[in-house]
Amino acid sequence: LLGRPARLRHTTIIRSHRNLATARPHIALSEAASAFTHPPPDPTMRPVALLLAPTALLLLLFLRETSSAPSKAAAAPSKPLLGRPGTNLKTGLVGMPNVGKSSFFNVLCNMAVPAENFPFCTIDPSQSRVGVPDARFEWLCEAYSPKSRIQAHLQVTDIAGLVRGAADGQGLGNEFLSHISAVDCIFHMVRVFEDEDITHVEDSVDPVRDMEIITAELREKDIEWAKAKLDHANKAARNVKGGSASKEAQEVEMLTKILQHLKDGGDIRTGDWTLHEVELLNEMLLLTSKPYVWLVNLSEADYVRKKNKWLVKIKEWVDAHGGGALIPVSVALEQKIQGMGEDDKAAYLKEAGCVSCLPKVIGSGLHALDMQCFFTVGADEVRAWGVRKGSKAPQAAGMIHSDFERGFIMAETMAYADLKEHGSEAAVKAAGKYRMQGKEYVCQDGDIFHFKFNVSPPSKKK
């Protein structure tokens, strides 16, 4: 046939995509338009052009959208995280005896573990989980009216009280410290309320002293573990060749730096560590590497009026020792409103001029664990899932089932904010904000996913 073949028009579209990649979408659109606004000379080719034009232009608009809005996954690599890798992370309630840990655990998780007025009432750790309050989850449930609603959860462990000398075996000693080692974030509760009927193991209320005691005991145990590992590394380094360039010698150097930091009174979580040092620390899982959330247990009167003589001193001490979320709580108040109905509870809190601390405590725990939420939605189920920040789409899929991660193909995703703005999935798609993401996509807080996967059955052995 005389005239330019139709396949050359496809070449124009490919060249337009290349222009998109070089951030010239206006040139790409003009080229695509010129490819189809001028009909081919052969009348028999005109129906072909008319059929191809809408499809090609829709594809071009999709490419323009994806090129003009690059994924956040292309951002600079994040700093390596201290702590146990994975998504099944736990928090632990830690503090001196009789500061209100077990009572707070009961109101937080709606449990009934023993909480008596004598030291070491708690011996074996109690574990439970608490639902994560999330307005986005509630909105999605209203929008989809699912048969099943499952919110994200935070795992909490109530750990026995710590006393001076625990690193040397006092109180529950090593048993207590092993329970702390099993969690990933510490809710450190200190007592500032005065009550003659509730004893204190140090015979007086001094939260700054109590924080010094507990952090010093954790640090002493870390020093003990670091010394043992350094001795083992020194023996291994003497038995290999390669001098200072060997892996064993480099480990000795890193362990020496870690041990010195602890001896200087620093916690692992406050240190400045290289990637290789973080990898070593994550194998050791030292107690002072865990993130902290500080809970200050006030009387109901002090909590309502938001005043106590210790609050400023506690804030100064926390800021000088690595920081962390500092949350005033009142176990007495939470116990009082726990048994009330929702209307009575709201009326009581409104009259008192305060709010419950529980949502803030739960949210701070998730933040300290570096967790975020994604959602799966549908008529059968709306569910919120917790996943570590920085996780990629296959890891998020693996939260649902290991087969989803193993056979991951792609993730169809839209942002919660876009769904709420446009009102429906169809409207989100029409706005060009419903995306197909691959294995390298980094999950964002509030993503709504539909995963596609394919797992081949194991081949039969002949």
Image (cartoon, rainbow, N blue to C red):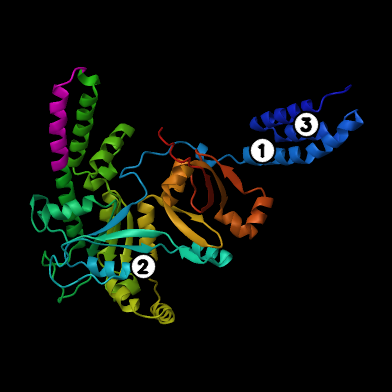
Give the image location of residue 404, x and y in percent. Answer: 46, 46
Q: Is residue 413 above or below residue 149?
A: above
Which numbered marker is on residue 412?
none
Which residue is identified by label 1? 63
Whichever of labels 3 and 1 marks the residue nearer the N terminus, that label is 3
Give the image location of residue 124, x and y in percent. Answer: 17, 61
Q: Quadrant of the C terminus?
A: top left
Left/right of residue 458 with respect to residue 228 in the rendered view: right
Which residue is identified by label 2? 357
* Separation of marks 2 and 1 at Cα, in angstroms: 47 Å
The type of residue carrying mark 3 is Glu
Q: In the depicted view, which residue is nearer to us: 330 or 174? A: 174
Which numbered marker is on residue 31?
3
Q: Within the image, what quadrant is residue 143 found in?
A: bottom right
Question: What range is drawn magenta here?
Answer: 224-242
- Label 2: element kind: loop
Give the image location of residue 174, x and y in percent. Answer: 13, 52
Q: Residue at x 84, y 24 (%)?
A: 4
Q: Within the image, what quadrant is residue 105 found in?
A: bottom left
- Residue 87 visible in the picture: yes
Residue 236 falls inside the magenta stretch: yes
